[in-house]
Image (cartoon, grey):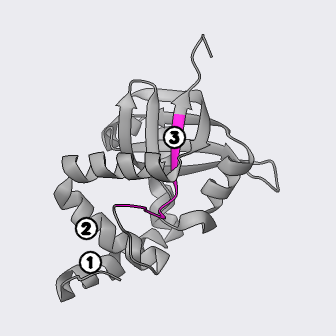
Amino acid sequence: MSNATPSSDAVGRTGARLLRNRALMRAPIWLYRARLGFLLGSRLLLLEHVGRKTGARRCVVLEVLGHPDRDTYVVASGFGDRAQWYRNVVAEPRVRVASGARGLSPATARRLSAAEADAALAVYVRKHPRAWGKFKTILENTLGTAISERDTELPMVELRLDGPGS
């Protein structure tokens, strides 16, 4: 994986274990449903998507890796292309997004190219180096492989809010 110290390895393993805890990961959804998503700040968002097999509406809260403009968010799939939300938005890109005080808004999901993912990751690493240090070890533990900042294999998705002109 990486040249991590024993303490960062422990953080990575613990973080990965927490990410696998379904009840814990679903708790923030209730804050968004209660219109209290603003309490979570602008670094998280609620993604509502449609199950590719069931057609049922599903929700997940994700960390925002990038927010290049007012109507665009970039998120990464911490479980790679195995993540159900990721597989669902690839199959059906029409989604809804809530972030901060903004309620659910229609959006379109698009998988970023490798070059776009590298650029988005570079901005995140530059803006949040300490968070990246911890986040990277957690990602490496959930994915079971090293994450590089160039030619990254970390799947990333752009969520663009559908505006009146779209």
Q: Main secondary structure of the magenta part?
A: loop
Amino acid type at mark 1: Val
User: Where is mark 2, residue-wise?
Assistant: 134
Which is in the foreground here, disc 1 or disc 3?
3
User: Where is mark 1, residue-wise?
Assistant: 11
Q: CA distance from mark 3 to mark 2?
A: 23 Å
Q: Is residue 153 magenta?
A: yes
Percent from the top left, x then y, of residue 50?
Answer: 72, 46
Where, quadrant-wise, is the N terminus in this rendering?
A: bottom left
Q: Residues within 10 Å of mark 1 (few under 14, many from 20)?
A: some
User: Where is mark 3, residue-wise?
Assistant: 158
User: Which of disc 3 and disc 1 is earlier in sequence?
Assistant: 1
| Dot 3: element | strand
| Dot 2: element | helix
Q: Is residue 4 left or right of residue 96?
A: left
User: Which of disc 1 and disc 2 is earlier in sequence?
Assistant: 1
Amino acid type at mark 3: Glu
**Looking at this view, is 19 or 140 the one in front?**
140
